[in-house]
Image: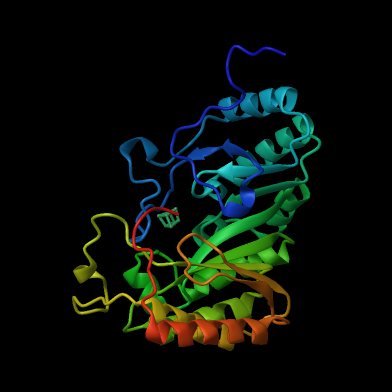
Amino acid sequence: MWYSQPPVSYIEPVFRPPSEADSLILQVTNGCSWNKCTFCDMYTDEHKRFRPKAEAEVLAEIQRCGESLPGVRRVFLADGDAMALSVRRLKTILTAIRTHMPSVRRVSAYCLPANLKRKSVEELAELRELGLTLIYMGAESGSDQVLRALDKGETFDSTAEALIKAGEAGIKRSVMLINGAGGQRFSEEHALASARLVNRVQPEYLATLVLFFRRGTDQTVLEGYDGDFQPLDGLGLFQEMRSLIAATELNQTIFRSDHVSNSLVLKGTLGKDKQRMLAEIDQAIEYARDHEIPVYRQGSF
Ligand code: SF4
């Protein structure tokens, strides 16, 4: 079949979670509606300013994908927070995917806690019924102090509430935390509060990556540090990871720290693999006491 235009068009750059490598990326919004986090420069270009993509354009793309890409099993709704769209708009998109791409088994999206504030559990359950079965939420930290410094616009309570709501609707939750987000001053608080957060919400997936600030961030003005934000070195990052994992009380959460920014790759299921992971971290800590560990400090997710 020949088409005068490609089935989808993108406003670059486009980001997706590592686990969506084989998914069809469908850009239903551009950019991020918050776009203030001090560590994130994914959508800072002028042409990435947040706006929903025109509904007619999205529906036409879904139809073309259905005709030209048979067999697609996973769809990721981009960009930074497709869940900012209304329930009506999301239902229209999911229904079109179901109609034109019947082989799709999973639709997922990034999601900010604020995106779910005005969506009820019942509405989210409707979205899940229509195929939205997974959201990725960058919680970053459970510490309100750290969240303020990151300018995340969320709190422990708002993040927990959103994740619990999604869980009650039957949507799987993939939660991301940032290793080193509290710097030296709030490292322990960050680790313990983050563990409390995930213990409260019991996400199906949990991942960590290492803190790096967006280019041009003035680290001397971060709230709560008196102009003295000190990043963790490799040893400090491992020690913080140990505090986090040790404090988790998770029943069945698949854990990954395999982002390019992590010097220590950990994989397993928490809690059954908790002791094995702690032993691996202890080994890394021992090694880091005598060796310099390179720390990833710049780039984008
Ligand atoms: S981390 Fe997420 S919420 Fe924060 S600016 Fe980046 S895309 Fe937006």
- Ligand 1 position by quadrant: bottom left
Q: Position of residue 162 (x, y in %)?
A: 58, 65
Above-or-below relation of 66 to 253: above
Q: Position of residue 213 (x, y in %)?
A: 32, 61
Above-or-below relation of 14 to 273: above
Q: Position of residue 38 (x, y in %)?
A: 33, 61
- For the C terminus, the quadrant is bottom left
Q: In the rendered image, is residue 192 in sight?
A: no
Q: Position of residue 200 (x, y in %)?
A: 62, 80
Left or right for 38, reference 90:
left
Left or right for 67, reference 155:
right
Q: How many marks?
A: 0
Above-or-below relation of 38 to 248: above
Using the rendered view, name the quadrant where residue 125 is placed. Answer: bottom right
Is residue 221 or residue 167 the one in the foreground?
221
Query: Measuring 40% from the left and 87% from the top, which residue is drawn there?
Result: 289
Query: Measuring 49% from the left and 49% from the top, which residue is drawn there?
Result: 80
